[in-house]
Structure formats: C-alpha cells, structure tokens
Image: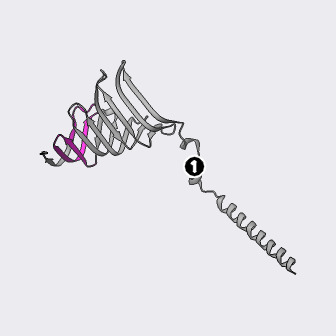
Amino acid sequence: MYKANYSLSLHKARSRAAALLLACLLSSCGNDIEKTRIFEPRNLPASTIVNAHIRRSENGSLQLLMEAPIVRQYGDPESKTVYPQGVRMRFFDGEDRPTGILTANYAVQYDKRQIVMVRDSVVIIDLQNGDTVYLIDLIWRQAEHRIFSNNPLRSKNGPRITLGDRFESDDAFKQPHIIHQRGTLEWKEE
C-alpha cells in the first residue's frame, strides 16, 4: 500500500511537472513581432567600435579629435552612427592649436540627412576666450552650416552667467547667439 501511494504521488508530480513545462514552452512561443524585430539584421549595427579615437583632418591639418567609449554604425534604411555612451570632441584651428571642446552623454549622426544631434549634459568650451555653454541638446545641420538648440541654456563667461531660451551659431562657433536672454548674473570672488 505504501509503495502504491508513493508511485501514485510520483506519477502526479511528474504529470504536474510536465504540465508546467508544457505551459512554459507554450507561453514563450508567441508571434509577438515587436519582440522578434530587435533581432532583424536592419536593427543590428553593421559595426561596433569600442574605445574609439577618431582624427579628422583637412588638407593635412588637424580639425577634430573625437573619443567615444562605443560607436555603432547602422546601414539602411537610415544610415546613422550612434554614440550611446557619449562623445568628447576637441576642435583645432588647422595648425594643431586647440580651439574648443564639446562633450555630451549621447550623440547620433544621420549620414543621408547630414544632421548630427548631441544631447544629455552638452557642454561647449571655447578655449580661445574661456566661454562655456551648457545645453540640454544641440543639433548641427551640416548642409546649412548651422548649429542650434531650442531648449533653455546657461552660458558662463568669466564671472558672468547668462540664461537663455535658445541657442544659434554658425558651425565654426564664430557667431554664437543666445536667443531670448532671461537674465545675466555677475559675481566677484573676494
């Protein structure tokens, strides 16, 4: 009698385990297209670079040094390069003298549209005059040679801090403008 009860409870346990396994298998097999699209080749990067150091020069003169922890390049349908962990760019005057620094926690470059967008703690430092601009995001329309942000910003020039609603500049940062300045603070350390 003891043996029969044992085999009956063992049989029930095996049946329950099989039913549970079957339920798990059936629930994991689904036709959720959104979940499977992430693995389609067009959604995966064509290449990934870790600890990238990129130099750009023009006619043999250094223009830009860029560093990024991760760079992901995607092909069609929209060719783009993504910097998911941010970028640090150092700009040069063509004679190996640094002129500025830009840092951001995220960046994406759309090749066909000729647009670069940086966001999340964007900081621009003009090394020639010491000005620093703090932005939420920044968009560079390469074809128009225009850089802008439609979000609030803060600019620091020596002991002076200026707050504004928008930012515009040419892509060489020779004519930066703070649109709708909301105030200027000035302090002197003693």
Q: Residue at x 21, y 34 (%)?
A: 175
Classify residue 1 as left or right of residue 143.
right
Q: Position of residue 139 (x, y in %)?
A: 33, 40
Query: Magenta segment range?
Result: 151-177
Q: Principal SS element in the magenta part?
A: strand
User: Are there few (<14), some (14-19), or many (20+) residues within 10 Å of tag 1?
Assistant: few
In the foreground, 10 or 125: 10
Hey, which residue is sitting farthest front in the picture? 190
Q: Is residue 156 magenta?
A: yes
Q: Residue at x 28, y 46 (%)?
A: 150
Badge 1 amino acid? Arg
Q: Which residue is mark 1?
A: 37
Quadrant in the picture for residue 109: top left
Q: Residue at x 59, y 46 (%)?
A: 39
Element on which disc 1 rests: helix
In the foreground, 158 or 174: 158
Quadrant in the picture for residue 145: top left
Q: Quadrant of the N terminus?
A: bottom right
